[in-house]
Amino acid sequence: MSSFELIRLTSVANNNSNRSFYLGIVGAVWAVASALGPVLGGIFAENLSWRWCFYINIPIVSFAIIILYFTLRLHNPRTPFLAGMGSIDWLGIFTILAATIFLLVGLQTGGTTSYTSPMVISFLVLGALAYIIFPLTQWWEDAHGGSPIMPLRIFRDRSNLSALGVCAFDALVFNSVAYFVPLYFQLVAGRSPSSTGVLMLALAIPLTLVSLTSGSVIEKTGRFMDWLQAGMLITTAGMGALISLSTDFDMGKSIGFLVLIGAGFGPTFHAPLIALQTRISAKDMAVGTATFGFVRMLAGAVGVVLGQVVFQALMRGSLDDIVDAGVPVLFAEQLARGEAVSQAGVVAGLEDRQRRVVRSAFMDALRGAFVVYTVVAALGLLATLGIKRVTLKREASAEEVSPVSVRVGGEEEDVEAGRGGDSEK
């Protein structure tokens, strides 16, 4: 083996050894943005204009583009335009896009109207059919020498399926917490959007600290499964604790529960991705990571819609009690249809008895959603049992790798020894 090849392998090894630390940083930033984004949107809508929820992205995205332009260095082999466009899995892209759009539009429309509507049923059926067809498009693309966007070989490994399952359950719960906990503060506790933003820091701060800490510790010890399972266990406990919230707002209890949930979410952003990357080949690293991101985004969107369906169903059950309290029928029906988010100010202006009845109905509906998400978090914990438990070994540095140890007759074994690899417990 040439000295150049030895240096290349050592460079790859060092990059792999730091991957968990970098993923911890990325996970922390992504988590904070996801947790505070909806709350900041509420603050903009309250104090400025809802348009600022979109305006604010212009300077942020522009700054990110400038930073990437001057700092990002990627190997980018040039491909002729027509050849590059022809190599794209267009059939798979259009199929998965159609499936996702039909499903989400059907779920969202059904939640605000009725799931017996012909249009809603059509959307859901078309979405389900498109998801069934999608694996066939990936098989066809692979059989004809193409580059499928989600190669089926990734899903043949039980550990990979479990890692993607944990990703889905975790994202479903996290996005829902970021959506429904602020609803509790505003609709039940009567807090303003700005006050809610401050309270949500109890989730964001421990999440960031634990994400960074876990990434650093995993980078040094290689024990990512311990962090992943502990995180899912704490998340499940935290979601279960939210069920005990009531209309009598207890700030200490609420902050404590959010700290617990934030600490649980800390390692669950990057640890499932590490588990997936340890089981896929180098050529599938990009598509595997992209698949992980797609599953996270889709599950997060479905999670919020699922919670809205539960919330609205329970609110409809409280419709008679709200009307009996003297709330106008039209306004009560608006609340039952899920328009409670936009009516927080009106609810705060109701008479004392009416306000108590409405907030009690809100709390019952939110409690039902918290029960569902607790079950989902528990399923995520169970899914971790299917991930192959390995310990990532920190690769040797350039000074520690000796060219003498590289034998031509045992190249594969010697390369693995130099790179560190993974080892089973």
Image (cartoon, helix red, strand yellow):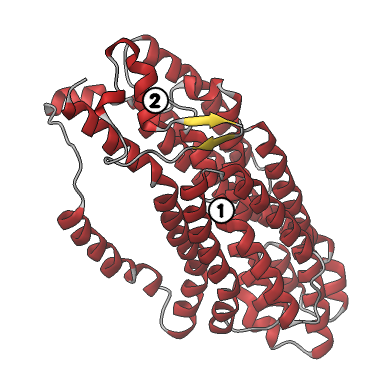
Marker count (numbered): 2
Q: Quick one: 247 or 127, which is closer to the camera?
A: 247
- The vertical placement of 295 against 56, above or below, is above
Q: Residue 240 at x, y = what percent? A: 78, 59
Q: Is residue 340 above or below residue 133?
A: below
Looking at the rendering, in which quadrant would you find the C terminus? top right
Report the amino acid beneath label 1.
Pro
> Dot 2, crowdedness within 10 Å: few (<14), some or many (≥20)?
some
Mark toward the viewer: 1 or 2: 2
Q: Is residue 74 left or right of residue 54?
A: left
Classify mark 1: residues with Cα within 10 Å, few (<14), some (14-19) or many (20+): many
What residue lies at 64% left-to-right and 58% top-to-bottom? 264
Residue kind at label 2, given as amino acid type: Glu
Q: Nearer the viewer, residue 402 or 232?
A: 402
Q: Identify which residue, 83 or 339, lies in the foreground.
A: 83
Residue 174: image quadrant is bottom right
- Relative image position of residue 49 (x, y in whole percent): 41, 79
Mark 1–mark 2 distance (CA, rounded to whole Å): 28 Å
Residue 310 shown left or right of residue 174 in the figure: right
Q: Which residue is mark 2?
A: 416
- Residue found farthest to the front: 404
Q: Secondary structure at mark 2?
A: helix
In the picture shown, does residue 394 fall above or below 40? Answer: above
Q: Quadrant of residue 26?
A: bottom left
Circle 1 sits in a helix, a strand or a loop, which is it? helix
The reply, left or right, for residue 255 in relation to residue 130 is right
For the point 70% across and 44% down, the residue is 381
* N-terminal-most mark, 1 or 2: 1
Residue 267: mark in rendering: 1
Which corner quadrant holds the N terminus?
top left
